[in-house]
Amino acid sequence: MSVEDFLYKIGELVDLNIRKLVAFINPSPSEGNPLSFKYLRRLVKRELTPHEFISLKLQLAFLIYLVINLVLLFLWVSPYWIVGVAVMYFLYLRYTLVTNREFLVEYEPYRFFYYGISVISFAIFLGYLLVRKIAANIYYYYSYLLVAFVVVMLFRWYFKRTFGRDYTYGVVEEVKNDVIKVFVHDDIAANVKPGHYWLPAVPDAEPGRVVKVLVEDRTFHSARPVRIIEVYLPQSSQSSTEPKNATE
């Protein structure tokens, strides 16, 4: 390889990485297909929809963010470390949400929840560093933890008041006697975990059809699907797996 070819390859590599950095800092919605989930596919043995993979990525990112900050607090580092980690995390959070927004069944609840809870977590970690400097006794810590708990509960209340609903959407997978097996997406607005649920049978609920499912809220637990309240006929649903138009 000549020197000219080598320098050309270096230039291409630099240009590619600059483009990736710009796309990371200033993301735009992905068109056509969702981003690759090759690492998550290795971690998760069962097949998931793009919506489920995106939700899982958001959950893992937030969990890792919390763990890193707890380690930093244990190491008694400078507050600048907390700020630096937060900057990287929020850039990644924004990149994940924006690039995948078209593949979330509902975008706004997820954006509001993860931005909100992340900002609260960042404020709690920084506040703890301040309390640690001024605390004269253990009651300072108890009071701070109480305040943090109240803030989180208020955020939970406001989120449920703004985006919460008592129904979700699912896809009929199997009809057996007087019960129906329905796959339900992860639904943060209805506080429902993804999975398969056996529900009482209703007319017109055939495999592949999208259904509207009533959920029962439970304190400090995920809501539980209880029965089907509407069946969407093929011409009225967007697809067999992501009833986005219906939810909007």
Image (tube, grey):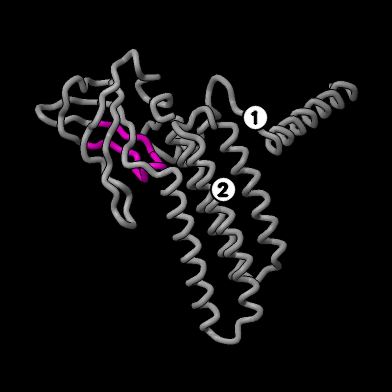
Is disc 2 in contact with disc 1, using a CB cutoff of under 8 Å? no
**Amino acid type, residue under disc 1 in the picture:** Ser
Residue named by callout 1: 28
Queried whether the magenta region covers residue 195, the answer comes back as yes
As displayed, is residue 157 above or below residue 133?
Answer: above
Q: x, y percentage for residue 40? A: 48, 38
**Amino acid type, residue under disc 2 in the picture:** Tyr
**Does any portion of residue 5 appear in the rendered image?**
yes
Of mark 2 and mark 1, the one earlier in the sequence is 1
Q: Quadrant of residue 227?
A: top left
Q: x, y percentage for residue 210? A: 31, 24
Q: How many residues crowd around disc 2 within 10 Å: few (fewer than 14), some, or many (20 or more)?
A: some
Residue furthest to the front in view is 161
In the depicted view, which residue is nearer to us: 207 or 139?
139
Residue found at x 22% / y 40%? 226
In the depicted view, which residue is nearer to us: 81 or 189?
189
**Highlighted range, magenta:** 182-197
Q: x, y percentage for residue 184? A: 32, 34
In the depicted view, which residue is nearer to us: 242 or 21?
242
Judged from the image, the secondary structure of the residue bearing numbered disc 2 is helix
Residue found at x 65% / y 29%? 28
Residue named by callout 2: 115
Residue 16 lies left or right of residue 181; in this view the side is: right
